[in-house]
Image (tube, grey):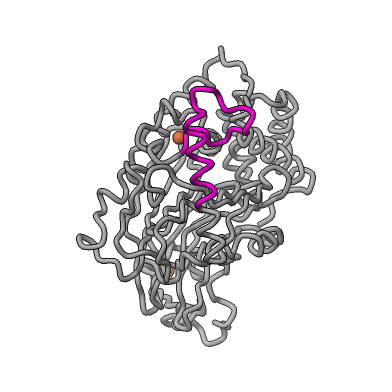
Amino acid sequence: MTDQLVGEPFAGRRTRILDHLDRRTPGHSLPGALYTDPDVFASEVDLLWRRRWLFVGTVAEVPEPGDYFSFDVAGSSVLVIRDDDEQVRAFHNVCRHRGSRLVAPGHGSVGNLVCGYHSWTYATDGSLRYAPQLSPAIDTACLGLRPVALREVGGLLYCSLAAEPDGDLDVVAEQVRDYITPHRLDRAKVAAQVDLVEEGNWKLVMENNRECYHCEGGHPELICTFFPTWGLREDQIPDRLRADHDRYLFAEADLARRCDALGMPYALIEELADRPFGFRIQREPLDGAGESFSIDGSRLVGRLLGDLDDPQLGRCTLHTQPNAWIHLLADHVVTFSVTPLSPDRTLVRSTWLVHEDAVEGVDYDVEALTAVWRATNEQDAEFVRNTQLGVSDPAYVPGPYNEAERQVDDFVRWYDAQIRSEAQRGGADD
Ligand code: FES
Ligand SMILES: [Fe+2]
């Protein structure tokens, strides 16, 4: 996105977002303009979305050489492809001739990447292999696809559009990789992928995901396996939820025993507010049978992931900011990526992964596998839509967070700190 498109000098926009942040009351929801103002959105694209590490998908989406998918964000289209040497790479989805998009949105598989305009042809490693009638004086070695920074963390793929991405993801990767690898995303396949456009600002989507204050009344399917005391400290458990909490403590101790037996990490690491790659990871028990996101908690896939043979491993949940939450279970993984489309529209992509050898109709049923989160996403989309309408209303006044919304507060503090530090650092990076 360029300054010309927005119509106000970049520095002016930057002052504007900082002015709104200066009006923020700590411990309260954000001022309305931060959810609605197009200039704020443009600043966020420049300062956050083009500079932070973004979750784009998993290696299971590109299992074979030549497999690719595109991920559109912040005015860019990123092409993720597995090359002929099995290495996953990322490039700008922009032809080096006259700029045509190389691939349409979505997934596909190619031998070479051939531009549809004048047939410039790129190898899967991005090098220009063939350009019809191009003058021999032009050095084709300089005309390979422009790379995008890519990191793999236990099969999760993160990209950064920054010319010089920060190194924080590499530090975090060391802390979280051992939680993820037992689920063997390199031996998983996509069972389903659903795109949902929510009618709200991307921050409302992330904030909504950072609390379960709304779960008891809002998610009848999800709370069959999410304990209703999630997010509360021991001393905040209301009497009416005491029996649920006792059940949680029992399940938590049982899960710890199982993880210890398998040498799998499960302890909470939570660094949401104070680092560029804010994150949280923990393996937590599920209610009911403790196996999966079904109504009774029993497994949804007969074939467990990787070499796992204990189905009762709860959910390993990873949050990464600005744009992902991921649940890794014994029988499947479900990932969510968030992409801002405009100040009041956000794409949420949900992807369900199962063992590569699991057979649809035999080991799993796609409807049943996806039912709880499809319902939950629709319910969350309604919460987000209603909140967008409310924060756009002149009557909106930011309200206080409670303890169950501690992670929402962490997210908002992270957002504030990242915007301020990037605004100080200077103009657009790329
Ligand atoms: S724009 Fe791609 S070959 Fe011309
Ligand atoms: Fe929700």
- Residue 58, percent across and down? 46, 63
Tell which of 411 and 134 is nearer to you. Answer: 411
Q: Is residue 113 above or below residue 224?
A: below
* Residue furthest out toward the bottom: 136
Residue drawn at point x = 57 percent, y = 82 percent: 141
> Residue 55: x, y in percent?
53, 55
Q: Main secondary structure of the magenta part?
A: helix
Q: Residue furthest left?
A: 361
Give the image quarter of residue 218: top left
Quick check: 247 left or right of 54? left
Q: Is residue 367 visible?
A: yes
Task: Name the residue at 42% across, 55% down.
Answer: 312
Q: Observer-nearest residue: 296 or 368? A: 296
Question: Looking at this view, is 360 or 346 the one in front?
Answer: 360
Q: Which residues are magenta?
A: 227-254
- Residue 235 on the magenta segment: yes
The residue positioned 51% from the left and 36% from the top of the image is 246
Work out whether residue 338 or residue 16 is closer to the camera in this orientation and state it.
338
Q: Is residue 323 above or below residue 395?
A: below
Task: Please tell me whether residue 137 is drawn above or below residue 103 in the rendered image.
Answer: below
